[in-house]
Amino acid sequence: QVQLVESGGGLVQAGGSLRLSCAHSGRTFSNHAIHWFRQAPGKEREFVAAISWAAGRTYYADSVKGRFTISRDNAKNTVSLQMNSLKPEDTAVYYCAGPALPFRVFTTRDGIAYWGQGTQVTVSS
């Protein structure tokens, strides 16, 4: 059974930083990109970032480009999201996600087969 477990959320002031981690188990994502999505109250779940497992290529939503950095540790089966210069509009539940198909990056939830339970990030102004 696939498990994706997020950690590292919390409350931070605007301009601050947080680091989220996603530990995955239960299957090999050797050719799959691990994604981060987020969902704010009353809004659709939106793509944040993704990293290809083999090549380490990274992809970002325009709203976080230059502030967030996604990385992975293959030996530990973890993916991290370093979030700097946080803004109140970054407040959301952040989800780690794995697609069903390899070699693809999905910027909508349609291609996502596996979700973590989510971790709350709150940025105060």
Image (tube, grey):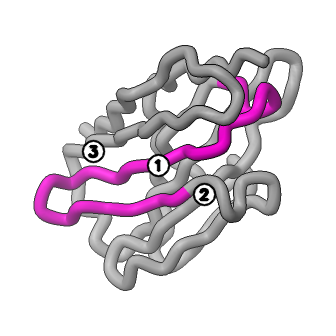
Is 31 placed left or right of 108 in the picture? left
Q: Amino acid at mark 1?
A: Leu
**Which one is earlier in the sequence, the residue at label 3 or at label 1?**
3
**Image quadrant in which the C terminus is located:** top right
**Image quadrant in which the N terminus is located:** top left
> Is residue 20 in sight in this rendering?
yes
Position in image of residue 2 (x %, y %): 29, 41
Depicted 103 relative to depicted 98: above or below: below
Depicted 30 relative to depicted 62: above or below: below
Q: Amino acid at mark 2?
A: Ala
**Which one is earlier in the sequence, the residue at label 2 or at label 1?**
2
Front position in the image: 2 or 125: 125
- The boundaries of the magenta stretch are 69-92
Is 12 placed left or right of 2 in the picture? right
Question: Regarding mark 3 in the picture, which secondary structure is present there?
Answer: strand
**Can residue 89 be found in the magenta stretch?**
yes
Residue 81: which disc?
1
Q: Residues within 10 Å of mark 3 (few under 14, many from 20)?
A: many
Depicted 59 relative to depicted 45: above or below: below
Q: Nearer the viewer, mark 2 or mark 1?
A: 1
Position in image of residue 100 (x %, y %): 48, 59
**Which one is earlier in the sequence, the residue at label 2 or at label 3?**
3
Asked if marks 2 and 1 touch (Cβ < 8 Å), the reply is yes
Residue at image coords 27%, 42% = 23
Q: Amino acid at mark 3?
A: His
Q: Residues within 10 Å of mark 2 (few under 14, many from 20)?
A: many
Which residue in the structure is indicated by mark 2? Answer: 49
Which residue in the structure is indicated by mark 3? Answer: 24
Q: Nearer the viewer, mark 2 or mark 3?
A: 2
